[in-house]
């Protein structure tokens, strides 16, 4: 696998992110989780290392690297801290990529350099209180009035919202009293009428920022319509396909981090006069974990590689996300089991990985939604045969 997907540049990036994660993130990850504190200082360091705009072209201030490179970075961050990995991934896949993919030249020139350079964070508001899996049920309305849109509605669970300089969001576009369909828009942090909710108190990803956004007659300039009117929904689905590869990488990293802890613990911990790694039940658990992680790695890097070759990856991204997120949940449970009672104690940190794993089966499309996407794709393929 190393040679097929990874160039020398990918390997260099991998060891750079691994060093950063081990030396600078690992010592504080547990404390950040306990305090539920957003790590401004680590985000600034990621910006210095060029990690906030990996797949953004150099002409817009990014690193100009590919999806595989971006996947490597998210994977490595998540081996140590899922919260930091989702902060970078939501910023990149959801807050920045839609502007690169659908923005006009003025929007790209204005927003991409500060986003890719990490001076500004991006966020993505699709989910609403009454529109989660059923994102087409969006109720937020953006009414065109002269040279601006007046927006009313609410977005829930918006990652990075409290830190973001710009938020990409969907709303129904209303022109001359007529609903033209779901469209995408950009809201800047200081938009009049934009109100932030309080940070959500979460089970996991506790040092990432998640909150609701309230649009109360929010004023958005007409130039902040992103892409063509009424294409917002399909644009977001496209952004989510790319995002799912990074959530797969996040799940892979979360599972791998917990597996590494369990492996080290099994070699050290003794029971009945020998290391518990000598017991077949423990050895088989470790063997299953390693095998499944290898399978997840192939699914994820294959999807990333296919995307870089210009292929459609709707099915592959959904499969990678579904498989890896369920695996992260299973592995973190087994990793706690291998730690025995100590696995239940915060100090051992393996429980943080378990709490961080659950949301991977929910965010950017639940496991049920991934199965709906995969089923639709395979049945369409079967139809074409
Ligand atoms: C920590 C966190 C961060 C998030 N970040 C963001 C973000 O940055 N931006 C954003 O827009 N959203 C974000 N989300 C929202 C997330 O994407 C949604 O929670 C998710 O899509 C599910 O929507 P819902 O919570 O409304 O659940 P629902 O859609 O109400 O689903 C409830 C249950 O019903 C199931 N279900 C629904 N429809 C079907 C169906 N047709 N068939 C079978 N089962 C079905 C679901 O799979 C689920 O099990 C975040 C969520 C969390 C928890």
Image: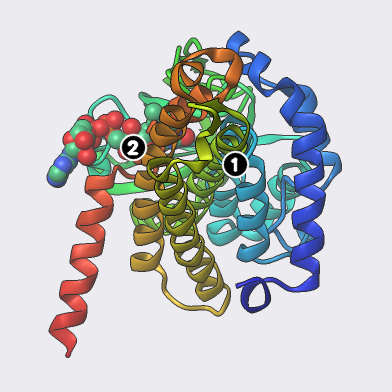
Residue beneath the point at 51% across and 30% down: 353
Examine the rendered structure and indicate whether residue 266 appears above or below residue 155. Answer: below
Which colour style is shown? rainbow
Label 1's element? helix
* Badge count: 2
Front-most of 247 and 216? 247
Residue holding disc 2: 362
Q: Residue furthest right?
A: 48
Label 2's element? loop
Would you identify the image quadrant in which residue 136 lies? top left
Give how far across and how far down residue 1 sits, in percent: 60, 73
Examine the rendered structure and indicate whether residue 203 appears above or below residue 298. Answer: above
Q: Residue furthest front?
A: 273
Q: Given this view, does label 1 or label 2 mark the residue nearer the observer?
A: 1
Q: Earlier in the sequence, mark 1 or mark 2?
A: 1
- Ligand 1 within 8 angstroms of badge 2 C-beta: yes
Q: Which mark is residue 260?
A: 1
């Amino acid at each position: 696998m190393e040679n097929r997907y990874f160039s020398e540049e990918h390997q260099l990036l991998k060891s750079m992110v691994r060093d950063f994660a081990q030396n600078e993130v690992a010592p504080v990850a547990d404390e950040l989780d306990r305090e539920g504190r957003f790590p401004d200082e680590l985000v600034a360091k990621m910006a210095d290392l060029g990690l906030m705009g990996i797949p953004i072209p150099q002409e817009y201030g990014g690193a100009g690297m590919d999806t595989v490179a971006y996947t490597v970075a998210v994977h490595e961050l998540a081996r140590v801290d899922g919260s930091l990995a989702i902060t970078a991934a939501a910023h990149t896949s959801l807050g920045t990529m839609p502007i690169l993919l659908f923005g006009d030249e003025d929007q790209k020139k204005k927003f991409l350099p500060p986003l890719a350079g990490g001076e500004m964070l991006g966020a993505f508001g699709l989910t609403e209180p009454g529109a989660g899996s059923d994102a087409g049920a969006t109720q937020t309305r953006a009414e065109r009035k002269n040279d601006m849109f007046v927006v009313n509605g609410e977005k829930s669970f918006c990652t990075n919202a409290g830190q973001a300089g710009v938020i990409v969001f969907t709303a129904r576009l209303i022109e001359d009293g007529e609903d033209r369909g779901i469209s995408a828009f950009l809201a800047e942090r200081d938009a009049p009428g934009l109100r932030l909710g309080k940070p959500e108190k979460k089970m996991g990803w506790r040092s990432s920022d998640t909150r609701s956004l309230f649009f109360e007659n929010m004023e958005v300039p007409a130039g902040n319509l992103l892409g063509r009117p009424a294409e917002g929904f399909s644009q977001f689905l496209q952004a989510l396909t790319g995002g799912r590869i990074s959530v797969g990488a996040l799940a892979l990293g979360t599972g791998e981090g917990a597996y590494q802890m369990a492996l080290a613990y099994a070699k050290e911990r003794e029971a009945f006069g020998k290391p518990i790694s000598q017991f077949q039940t423990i050895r088989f658990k470790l063997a299953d974990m390693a095998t499944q992680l290898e399978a997840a790695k192939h699914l994820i890097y294959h999807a990333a590689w296919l995307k870089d070759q210009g292929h459609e990856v709707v099915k592959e991204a959904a499969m990678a996300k579904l498989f890896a997120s369920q695996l992260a949940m299973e592995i973190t449970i087994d990793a706690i089991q291998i730690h025995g009672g100590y696995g239940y104690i915060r100090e051992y940190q393996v429980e943080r990985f378990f709490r961080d794993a659950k949301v991977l089966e929910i965010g950017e499309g639940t496991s049920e939604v991934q199965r709906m996407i995969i089923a639709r794709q395979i049945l369409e393929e079967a139809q074409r045969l």
